[in-house]
Image (cartoon, grey):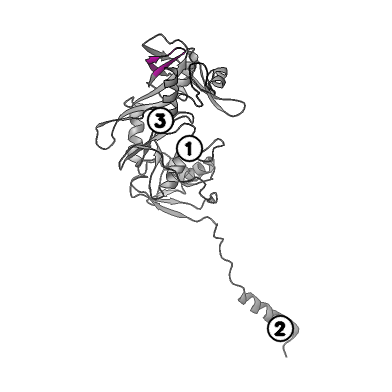
């Protein structure tokens, strides 16, 4: 007979053999090998990683880059390397944020122009162009949700949430970088229609005031005129005068945040309905019809025209968007 210790050892051995080896967790990070597509080519490796590695702190992404763990075509690169179509990028195991369910509803917007390179829409007032700062989603997230097969879709520029009108999106990275170069070089021509309160005198007026961005105690982004701020230039052309208002076209020579709004406010002319830089008592009064006018329940600022060189054909493209009905109705009430 076997002694008790031998029997116990045998039972333990059988138990061990029955227990399957522990498998790695499905959420455990693994090495990724990604091949760069035509749409992804041209961007810097650090920007590519920041977009791919959702929920990973920026400092950690750069630490991994500096360590040499990220490889392109099996070779080491630095953070300034620009990706080429067909590059194979090795991303080391990095724990990323768990994917969340798609919360942005599918939404299309009025299309002003579309081809294989560009999408130009007419954005309504009150809709943010992207999520963030307490906003779950914006135009770009909604369009991506409605176009799940789109390989690439990015904002070329931005509009304030309260501003309506022309918004450009790129469907290829090459178009995005080309249009950004045009904007930096002053090739694009962006024009807005706005209604200001007061007695506007000049048929054409240049406003050159340096602008400085800052954040309020509540965390809200604002802009003010400041001598050491960014150089800014807007040309205003009078379109029509009314009893207490003037309709202006604003031509942007630079593209600073809130430029038109701050330039007009600093010049003594508040945009009707502007809740950041305008006349707050006037805005309250405009919410209801008054003597000789209708009601206005939005900011009267509309991106109505843009001209640029098409990134593929090289031809000049000009796109227009007429004033929204609520703005047209308010002007008719003034007339």
In the picture, measured across the screen, residue 289 lies left or right of residue 13, that is: left
Which residues are the magenta region?
Answer: 234-248
| N-terminal label among 3 and 2 | 2
Which one is nearer the viewer's eye here, 319 or 58?
A: 319
Q: Point out the residue furthest to the front here.
A: 291
Residue 312 included in the magenta stretch of the image: no
Location of mark 1 (residue): 130
Image quadrant for the N terminus? bottom right
| N-terminal label among 3 and 1 | 1
Q: Point out the residue furthest to the right here.
A: 4
- Relative to 108, does residue 244 appear above or below in the rendering? above
Give the class, few, some or many, for how many residues have Cα within 10 Å of label 1's Cα (few <14, many ≥20).
some
Please, what secondary structure does the residue beneath circle 2 have?
Answer: helix
- Find the distance from the CA under tag 3 to the CA under tag 2: 83 Å
Image quadrant for the C terminus? top left
Location of mark 3 (residue): 165
Residue at 49%, 32% in the rendered image: 126
Location of mark 2 (residue): 7
Residue 240 included in the magenta stretch of the image: yes
Give the class, few, some or many, for how many residues have Cα within 10 Å of label 2's Cα (few <14, many ≥20).
few
Q: Position of residue 217 (x, y in %)?
A: 62, 26
- Find the distance from the CA under tag 3 to the CA under tag 1: 15 Å
Residue at 46%, 23% in the rendered image: 300
Q: Is residue 241 visible?
A: yes
Q: Position of residue 93 (x, y in %)?
A: 51, 53
Of circles 3 and 1, the one toward us is 3
Q: Position of residue 112 (x, y in %)?
A: 34, 35
Q: Main secondary structure of the magenta part?
A: strand
Disc tally is 3
Q: Position of residue 329 (x, y in %)?
A: 43, 25
Of circles 3 and 2, the one toward us is 3
């Amino acid at each position: 007979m076997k002694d008790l210790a031998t029997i116990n050892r045998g039972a333990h051995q059988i138990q061990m053999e029955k227990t399957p080896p522990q498998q790695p967790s499905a959420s455990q990070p693994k090495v990724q090998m990604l091949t760069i597509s035509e749409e992804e080519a041209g961007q810097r490796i650090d920007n590519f990683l920041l977009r791919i590695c959702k929920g990973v702190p920026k400092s950690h992404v750069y630490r991994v880059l500096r360590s040499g763990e990220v490889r392109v075509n099996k070779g080491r690169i630095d953070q300034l390397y620009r990706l080429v179509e067909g590059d194979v990028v090795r991303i080391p195991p990095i724990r990323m944020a768990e994917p969340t369910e798609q919360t942005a509803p599918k939404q299309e917007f009025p299309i002003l122009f579309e081809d294989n390179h560009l999408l130009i829409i007419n954005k309504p007032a009150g809709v943010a162009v992207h999520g963030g700062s307490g906003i779950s989603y914006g135009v770009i997230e909604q369009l991506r949700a409605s176009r799940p097969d789109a390989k690439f879709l990015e904002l070329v520029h931005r509009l304030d949430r309260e501003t309506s009108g022309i918004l450009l999106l790129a469907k290829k990275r090459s178009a995005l970088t080309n249009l950004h170069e045009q904007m930096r070089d002053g090739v694009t021509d962006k024009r807005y229609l706005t209604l200001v309160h007061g007695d506007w005198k000049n048929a054409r007026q240049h406003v050159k005031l340096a602008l400085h961005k800052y954040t309020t105690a509540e965390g809200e982004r604002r802009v003010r005129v400041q001598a050491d701020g960014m150089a800014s230039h807007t040309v205003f052309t009078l379109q029509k005068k009314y009893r207490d208002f003037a309709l202006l076209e604003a031509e942007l020579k630079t593209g600073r945040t809130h430029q038109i709004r701050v330039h007009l406010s600093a010049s003594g002319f508040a945009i009707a309905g502007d809740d950041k830089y305008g006349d707050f008592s006037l805005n309250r009064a405009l919410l209801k019809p008054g003597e000789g006018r209708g009601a206005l329940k939005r900011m009267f600022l509309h991106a109505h025209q843009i001209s640029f060189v098409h990134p593929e054909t090289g031809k000049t493209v000009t796109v227009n968007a007429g004033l929204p009905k609520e703005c047209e109705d308010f002007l008719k009430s003034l007339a």
